[in-house]
Image: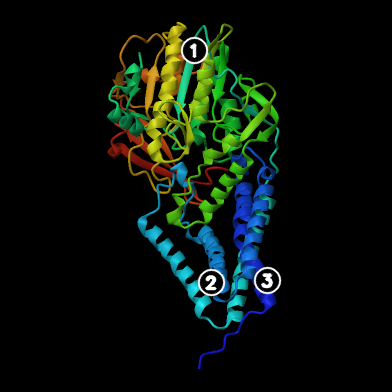
Amino acid sequence: MSKEIIELSSKQKLWLSILAAAALPFAVLICGIGEIYLNNSAEFLFVLSDFWPLSIGIGIAIFAVLAIVLRFLKGKAFHVVLSLLVWLALMSYVQGVFLNFGMNSLGADELAGGVGVGLVILDLAIWLLTGAGFVLAALLVRDKQTLGMLATVALVMVIAVQAINLGLAFVGSEEKEKTQTVLTTENIFEVSEGDNVIVFLLDRFDIYYYQKLLEQEPHFFDGLDGFTFYDNNISLYSRTYPSVTYMLTGVENPFKNTREKYFEDAYADSPFFRDLKDNGYKINLYTSAYYAYDDASVFGDAVDNVSRYQDYVIEGRMELVFKMVQLALYRYAPLGVKDSIQVSSADFGGFISFDTDNDYEQYVMNDAETYRLFRESGLTTQKKNNTFTFLHLNGCHSPYTMDENGNAIPSNNYASAAIPALKGCFKLIYEYIEQLKALGLYEDATIIITGDHARAMDDTVDVEGARVTALFVKESGSHGTPLADSSAPVCQENLRAEIVKSAGLKTQNDYGAAFSDIDEDADIVRKYYFEKSNGDKDEIVVYHVKGDAKDFDNWTLHERLVIGEIYK
């Protein structure tokens, strides 16, 4: 004789329905989004109130729908749907806390290097087996009250832990101010009728992309009149932070203080901007907040395209919420699903329109928008000063917003879009060059096209292959000659010296050797600081490179420096 079914009481069924309907939207749309923002608020340009009320409203709406559905389900249908909701809530929490296997970056940022197939299969098996177990229990276990009690405990635990984590995030967070000093788009395409130094920084411009583009179009770079291509150039760092600041200042990051402290010290201690100013240069920087500066007041009065904004407007609030939901889902989803959640840390800069002290908005890296501004204005000239322009583009880094013709495309994070985006960047550069020539300013211009760092492979393991950054240099006075090649062992340490030499700056400071001062057979040991993610014990893995950097046999692991957190 079969055991009698012990059914849930109406009151038990009601409370279980409320808990099961609330757990998932509460975890993702309220706690998950809120906690992720609060723990990383320095990376976002907006404040919590810009998206959280709407996400809370959506979460409440989803809760209401699920609760109503559960209220009217009966018998096995109720228990199966209930078990699935409990399974999703519990496994999402388990995934986010225990099963992400050291993933420290978003997949679309192309830093994690991917997860092994074995781990993906194991993770999927855990999800499927637990899901099958929950459904079978709902169908076969006859003591529904005991089952309901266990489900209640699981749901209360998930909700309570998420709420506690959110509370802790609130306690540890600082209120973000809407008033801030920023780099704007002012004078972005202004050049001097005197001397010009122009640096085009294409993010993640690895020599790999240069080679891939040449395979498609062997003569693509032939239009770089008077340039030299250096195929043996390495960046000092493996990420945008602190590469950009190092390129501009020559001050290495000791990784002993916060980002803000490094920015403050580097821009204050470096003589480079002062020497440019003393030589009559107007300095215009166009680069990203957070990775190159936090508040543009750190530049003092050296940089010209600085403005303070008092407020901003969120454009596309629903789209912003959707991106924040994607962030939360990326945390809670199974490993095999994460690649389909295409969200990048660089996606969040396009939701804001700033009200600055002038008519210019904050410069946000969006290559299609930058190219549109260029086509709209073209180059303009001024007579008062020489001009130093540093233009940082997404280049080979996702999200790719531009095709090879410079047209805007929907934000695309797939690696296959890197080459079309690179072509689009060079379309802008080639048109910029042609306009310089038309203005009679090309011959005397110093132009450098390079990357801030090489491409990402896997930032969770030691370097396993050469990391070489593409570099093109046109010195002042060089023109009317085909693209030359050099295998000289150069690095970012030579960048400021090259500018000083080519532009003929008068200075009492010793900047060392320029790119063009290095012989191809020079016996030079270069450094490479690989920023390795190890959770809460991140490392700087220091390599010494001697000879051809493209040959990984010439890379020697020198030392490891445990720094705690890279971004602090």
Q: Nearer the viewer, residue 153 or 200?
A: 153
**At label 2, which amino acid type do we have?**
Val
Does the CB distance between marks 1 and 2 fall below 8 Å?
no
**At label 3, which amino acid type do we have?**
Trp
Query: Residue 110 at x, y = what percent?
Result: 43, 43
Query: Residue 259 at x, y = what percent?
Result: 58, 38
Give me the disc on residue 273. none
Give the image quarter of residue 487: top left
Query: Residue 392 at x, y = what percent?
Result: 50, 27
Instruction: Identify residue for label 2.
Output: 80
Residue 53 in the image: above or below residue 447: below
From the viewer's perspective, is 252 left or right of 180?
Answer: left
Q: Nearer the viewer, mark 3 or mark 1?
A: 3
Q: Crowding at label 2, few (<14), some or many (≥20) Cα neighbours within 10 Å?
A: some
**At label 1, which amino acid type do we have?**
Asn
Q: Nearer the viewer, mark 1 or mark 2?
A: 2
From the viewer's perspective, is 545 left or right of 294?
Answer: left
Give how far apart the Cα atoms at labels 3 and 1 are: 71 Å
Give how far apart the Cα atoms at labels 1 and 2 are: 70 Å
Give me the disc on residue 15. 3
